[in-house]
Amino acid sequence: MTLAVDSLRVVYREGDHGILALDQVSLTLEPGRCLALVGESGSGKTTLGMACMGLLPKSAEVRGRIILDGKVLDGTDETAMNRVRWAELSMVFQNGAANLNPLHRIVDQVAEPLIHHGGAGRRSALDRAADALVRVGLGPDLHRRYPHQLSGGQVQRVLLAMAGVLDPGVLILDEPTSALDALSKGIVAKVIREAVARGRAVLLITHDLEFAVHQADRMAVLYLGQVLETLPPGDLLSRPLHPYT
């Protein structure tokens, strides 16, 4: 699947005040490719990911288009977006544990997209969820634990398993390596490589320039809501054109 962001503008409104988060951003995620979006905190990286998922708050004023395989996504149509999320377009969010239900075991949470979006029966969904957890390095002894019983790196792997369990055409990873150890970073890198090899499009949102350079096919530099330049990974540190980069 191809995901195109066309002249996207996002303003957060509160009364008479407005904060410009994204300003005429245009990017294309191609099948079998990984695009890394880099920039400092507050540059609009997470806003871009949330806009693609149709998960911006009601205070957000959105202009421009987000196009998935030729179809314009309407982020305000929750019913339509629910048909797309998880199955065609999925995201690993920041702040790992906050995105998991503390009252449910992790295998049940990974199985949920399979049941609600993939039409799988509970037994089949649990088996596939267990396989997905094993693929990200979480053995059967961990599957019935609750989120608070896992380390930060293990929680991040649960989110990776959940986002990829339906093998969506587009995978968005928002700061997937933040505060992770080397082993967990290696798992994230493996997930990206395998998704790209299966022809999936990956958007890697990150502060980790070294990780991005090694995983991405292309880099986009975001500053104050604008894409300043796109360039090959090898040129990011050695031959940038824009002074900010």
Image (cartoon, rainbow, N blue to C red):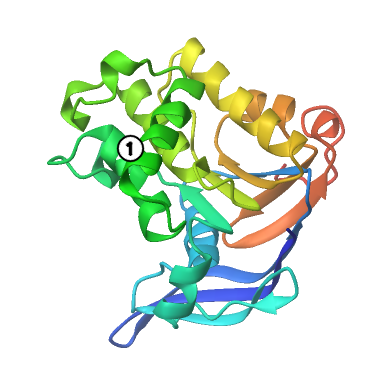
Q: Is residue 65 left or right of residue 183?
A: right
* Residue 192, x across and y down, in percent: 64, 33
Q: Residues within 10 Å of mark 1 (few under 14, many from 20)?
A: some
Q: Is residue 149 left or right of residue 69?
A: left
Q: Picture quarter containing residue 101?
A: top left
* Residue 241, x across and y down, in percent: 85, 44
Q: How many marks?
A: 1
Q: Is residue 93 above or below residue 63?
A: above
Can you say which quadrant of the picture contains the C terminus?
Answer: top right
Q: Is residue 150 above or below residue 10?
A: above
Front residue of 97/42: it is: 97
Q: Is residue 177 left or right of residue 148?
A: right
Q: Is residue 208 left or right of residue 137?
A: right
- Which residue lies at the image location 43% right of the left edge and 21% below the top edge? 180
- Which residue lies at the image location 43% right of the left edge and 60% below the top edge? 117
Q: Amino acid at mark 1?
A: Gly
Q: Residue furthest left?
A: 103
Q: Can I make out residue 144 in this image?
A: yes
Q: Residue furthest bottom?
A: 16
Q: Secondary structure at mark 1?
A: helix
- Which residue lies at the image location 63% right of the left edge and 53% below the top edge? 170
Q: Which residue is mark 1?
A: 96
Front residue of 99/85: it is: 85
* Residue 183, x across and y down, in percent: 49, 11
Can you say which quadrant of the picture contains the N terminus?
Answer: bottom right
- Which residue lies at the image location 24% right of the left edge and 22% below the top edge? 150
Q: Can I make out residue 43 in this image?
A: no
